[in-house]
Each structure stands twice: as structure tokens, then as C-alpha cells.
């Protein structure tokens, strides 16, 4: 039997990889992990404190706070804004929201003191908010949510119902990110798709699986479980803090991660540059600062996303019908797997054919993240350099 020529071999490997990903890799692409509201209500609704770290968030904070104050939650809910040295009137926006709402007395503002060495900015703000709230008693749950997330009125009820019914230590939602009509119309759904590929939600939610992750924009955390895991202090240097939280809590309990169409990030991404910076800020951290992992990632992304359209569309040049056919199959299978995420973002399924372009751009963003690391341009939070925990470099 003659060996496959290089083009046919590359196409066959790409198709085989997509067959594995679609049919044997944790159903990551189905987008079927949702809070459907069918969990039974607890006999007694526990106390919850929402902690919102905020740095220069005056543009979006008012809407976020109104959505929290509008929760139809039957139990006690308090809200603490951790104002981290904002310079744009963030605290005043919070005070105005409290004055304008009938439940404004539930809202308190904690000013974040100077950050100690070894803490990243967001984690220190969350720690400050938790310390401030604990003075009035520790609740059963913390709701850790970003300042740009607008919540549906029944969100907390659904989160708590899921946590209580499943005896979960963490329930987190990947909220629907803001998309426009430019590059972000493709790249934002692709970002969600790639996140699901990195952390297949069904595996995260399976107690028997070691896969752990979380979405930091909306996370309900059992206080006792967080205390056992070492508290926020154990995460003080984590740049990708949400997934670190998921790993810490799954070691001692059960967690759940899902997608949401009703909870939304209201912060727009304006063009390719802002999406690029969002990814490049932490992509090399995700690879544990390993150059070997970077090389493997780039080669893998090229095989998955770049090879199929090049080999399929390049048939008039290379005249390898087998390679073109296998590559077309890989391309169509990848597009089909992208369709549920596109449907979540109300984008046509035809956008799936653009997944190779998105994958190639994300590979470039990952390389840029590594180059930024070489230039000592570390991860930031709201424009301020962090003190992220960095593993020993691997080569």
C-alpha cells in the first residue's frame, strides 16, 4: 500500500481530528448546558451577597446595579460594590442607582485600599468586597459578578435553585457577550466556541471528570466551600481567576458551568483591536507560559482551521482530489459544530464557514500574547498592570 502524499495526509488528519472533537470530546459544541428554571425551589431561600468589583465602570455600572436590585429573589440579597480607585465617578453612579431604586438600601460601596504585593487587581477588589460584606454576617452564597453584566430578573432565583438542588459549590454562567456588525460578529461567538472547546461544559459538570472551569462574569459560590478552598486569598495571583476558582472548588465538591442568553455583558467590543487585546491579554497565561505548548497550539490550530479551506479551495492548483474532498469534509464538519453557538448569538449558520478565519486570527492573538510576555507587558485589569502568578517558563 502506497503511503499517503503529504496533502492527503494533512487533510485526513484534519478530518480525523474534527470527527474526534465532534463525536468524542465531551459534546462541547452542543450549547446544551443551560439553566432552564426547572430546578425545585428550596424550602428556605438562603442569604446571598453580590460582590461587584468595579474600576472606572461609570458607563455600564448603573444598568448592572439596576438589574441586581430588580431581582425577584425571595431571600435576603445584599450588594457590595468594591470601587477600586476609580477616576470616572463610578462610586457616584452607584450612589445614584441606590437613591433611585426602592431597594437601594441593599446596596453598599466599599472603597478598595492600595493593593498588596502579590495580588492581581480584580482579586484584591473581590477580597475587599467580601471583607466589607462579612462585617454584617457571612451569607450562604456569594454572587461574584462583573460590573458590565446585566442580569435577568429571575437569574439569582435560578442560580440558587440549581445550587441547592444539586448541592453545588459553584454555579457559573457564561453570559452572552456583546456583539456588533463588524469583526466581533464573527469573533465573539468564536471566542465562546473556543472557550467551550478548552473547557467542555458537560465534562466540567460531571463529578467524575477532572475538567474544571468557570465563567467569572456570573458565579454563585457557596461561602463554606470557598473558605475550605482557602478563600479569595488562594487565588490572589491568578490572572485567569474564574477557571482557577473552578479548579479549586471542584477538588472538594461539585460545580456547574452553563451558557446564558438572558444574562448579558453590556460592554461593546469596538472592532478587531478590542477583541484582539481581550484574547492577547491572557492567552499565553492559559498556556502556562510554555513555548512548547505555544508551538503545539499553533500547529494544532493550523491543522484544524487553516488546512481545510486551503486544501479544499486549492484543488485547482494541487489537483489532489482526495485531499480536497477530505479537507472539505473537515471544513463542513467544523462549520456544523459552530452552528449551535451561532444560533445562541442569532447569527446565520453560514457564518460557520468563517470559523477557519476566526481560528487563524485567534492563533495570531495567542502568538502576540507570547510576544507581549517577552516584552514584559503582563496581564492587566482595567488598564492597570497586575501581579499575576507565573509558572516557571517551559521550553
Image (spheres, rainbow, N blue to C red):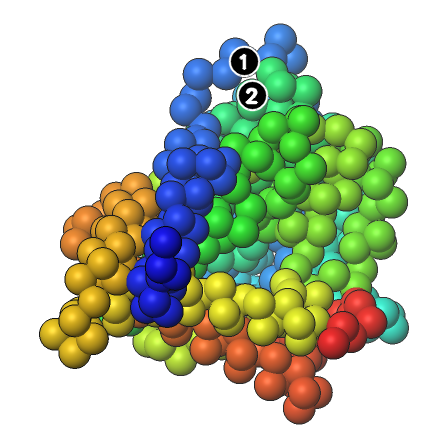
Q: Residue 63, position in %: x, y?
A: 43, 53
Q: Do the residues labelled 2 and 1 touch (CB within 8 Å)?
A: yes
Quarter occupied by the N terminus: bottom left
Residue that extends furthest to the bottom in the rendered view of this protein: 375
Q: Residue 329, position in %: x, y?
A: 24, 51
Instruction: Using the image, determine if residue 370 lies above or below residue 82.
Output: below
The residue at the point 52 percent across, 12 percent down is 40
The residue at the point 48 percent across, 47 percent down is 196
Q: Give the total number of marks visible in the rendering.
A: 2
* Nearest the eye: 272 or 30: 30
Residue named by callout 1 = 41
In the picture, the disc for residue 326 is none
Marks 2 and 1, the one that precedes in the sequence: 1
* Nearest the eye: 184 or 335: 335
Judge the density around disc 1: few (<14), some (14-19), many (≥20) Cα neighbours within 10 Å: some
Q: Residue 292, position in %: x, y?
A: 66, 72
Q: Can residue 322 be seen from the camera position used here? A: yes
* Nearest the eye: 280 or 57: 280
* Nearest the eye: 273 or 287: 287
Residue named by callout 2 = 161
Residue that extends furthest to the front in the rendered view of this protein: 1
The residue at the point 40 percent across, 32 percent down is 32
Q: Can residue 121 be seen from the camera position used here? A: no
Q: Residue 10, position in %: x, y?
A: 38, 64
The residue at the point 34 percent across, 67 percent down is 5
Q: Quadrant of residue 123?
A: bottom right
Amino acid at each position: 500500500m502506497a503511503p499517503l502524499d503529504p496533502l492527503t495526509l494533512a487533510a485526513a488528519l484534519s478530518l480525523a481530528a474534527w470527527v474526534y472533537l465532534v463525536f468524542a470530546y465531551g459534546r462541547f459544541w452542543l450549547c446544551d448546558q443551560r439553566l432552564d428554571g426547572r430546578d425545585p425551589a428550596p424550602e428556605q431561600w438562603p442569604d446571598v451577597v453580590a460582590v461587584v468589583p468595579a474600576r472606572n465602570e461609570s458607563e455600564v455600572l448603573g444598568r448592572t446595579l439596576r438589574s441586581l436590585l430588580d431581582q425577584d429573589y425571595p431571600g435576603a440579597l445584599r450588594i457590595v460594590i468594591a470601587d477600586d480607585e476609580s477616576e470616572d465617578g463610578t462610586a457616584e453612579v452607584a450612589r445614584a442607582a441606590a437613591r433611585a431604586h426602592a431597594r437601594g438600601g441593599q446596596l453598599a460601596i466599599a472603597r478598595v485600599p492600595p493593593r498588596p504585593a502579590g495580588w492581581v487587581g480584580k482579586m484584591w477588589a473581590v477580597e475587599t468586597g467580601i471583607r466589607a460584606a462579612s462585617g454584617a454576617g457571612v451569607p450562604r452564597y456569594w454572587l461574584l459578578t462583573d460590573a458590565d453584566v446585566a442580569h435577568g430578573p429571575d437569574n439569582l432565583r435560578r442560580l440558587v435553585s440549581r445550587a441547592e438542588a444539586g448541592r453545588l459549590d459553584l454555579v457559573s454562567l457564561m453570559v452572552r457577550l456583546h456583539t456588533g456588525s463588524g469583526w466581533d460578529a464573527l469573533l465573539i461567538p468564536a471566542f465562546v466556541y473556543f472557550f467551550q472547546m478548552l473547557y467542555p461544559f458537560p465534562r466540567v459538570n460531571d463529578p467524575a471528570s477532572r475538567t474544571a472551569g468557570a465563567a467569572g462574569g456570573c458565579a454563585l459560590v457557596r461561602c463554606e466551600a470557598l473558605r475550605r478552598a482557602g478563600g479569595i486569598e488562594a487565588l490572589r495571583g491568578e490572572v485567569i481567576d474564574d477557571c482557577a476558582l473552578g479548579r479549586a472548588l471542584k477538588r472538594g465538591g461539585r460545580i456547574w458551568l452553563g451558557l446564558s442568553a438572558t444574562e448579558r455583558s453590556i460592554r461593546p467590543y469596538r472592532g478587531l483591536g478590542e477583541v484582539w487585546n481581550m484574547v492577547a491579554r491572557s492567552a499565553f497565561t492559559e498556556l502556562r507560559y510554555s513555548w512548547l505548548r505555544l508551538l503545539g497550539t499553533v500547529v494544532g490550530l493550523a491543522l484544524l482551521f487553516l488546512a481545510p479551506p486551503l486544501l479544499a479551495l486549492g484543488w485547482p492548483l494541487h489537483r489532489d482530489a482526495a485531499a480536497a474532498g477530505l479537507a472539505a469534509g473537515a471544513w463542513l464538519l467544523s462549520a456544523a459544530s459552530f452552528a449551535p453557538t451561532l444560533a445562541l448569538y442569532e447569527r446565520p449558520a453560514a457564518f460557520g464557514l468563517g470559523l477557519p478565519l476566526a481560528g487563524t486570527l485567534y492563533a495570531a492573538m495567542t502568538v502576540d500574547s507570547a510576544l507581549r510576555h517577552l516584552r514584559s507587558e503582563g496581564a492587566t485589569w482595567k488598564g492597570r498592570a497586575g501581579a499575576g502568578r507565573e509558572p516557571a517558563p517551559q521550553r
